[in-house]
Amino acid sequence: MADLQQRILDIIHKPQLAALATVTEQNNPWVRYVVTVGGGDFSLRCATFVHSRKVDQIKHNDNVHLTCGVNSLMEMKPYLQIQGKAHITTDKEELHAFWNDMLSPIFDGPDDPKYSLIVVEPYRIEYCTPGSYEPEVWTK
């Protein structure tokens, strides 16, 4: 299991494009691209606007799904299917810790009142390897 955990961390630790699925108020799925960064505790974070549609959807239903790990069609490699609970934070320390220059075209710095973070706490992660039909599963 420790080997699986390390392989998961190897994928989530760097900033990457991911597909985030939420549930609308009408109980329909909604998917969009976000840039995530994962921590050593398996949590993933991404920046968003405080009043975005995904924030409203997470407040209504905190169940989310992320797919990440493949960044090129030319190089298929292991990827993750992540189920988790999400929450929104505007904690000043967390916003400053997450801040990077790539966010500056979108927000007016880490103290911008429009800036918030989505924090996803996974409870199930499937490690999928191309060519294999059976993922390895990590659960909390």
Image (cartoon, rainbow, N blue to C red):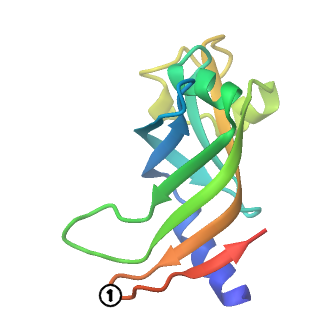
Q: Is 3 or 67 nearer to us in this picture?
A: 67
Q: Is residue 3 above or below residue 27?
A: below
Specify whether 59 is left or right of 115. Answer: right
**Which quadrant of the structure image shows residue 88?**
top right
Q: Is 35 or 68 nearer to us in this picture?
A: 68
* Secondary structure under the numbered disc 1 in the rendered image: loop
Specify whether 103 is left or right of 119. Answer: left
Specify whether 126 is left or right of 84. Answer: left
Image location (x, y in percent) of residue 104: 48, 24
Check disc 1 and report the residue beneath it: 131
Specify whether 35 is left or right of 119. Answer: left
Image location (x, y in percent) of residue 40: 73, 64
Q: Quadrant of the C terminus?
A: bottom right
Q: Is residue 11 above or below residue 33?
A: below
Mark 1 Cα within 10 Å, few/some/many (few <14, many 20+)?
Answer: few
At a point 43% along the width and 65% down the height, the residue shown is: 69
Residue at the left extreme of this rendering: 74
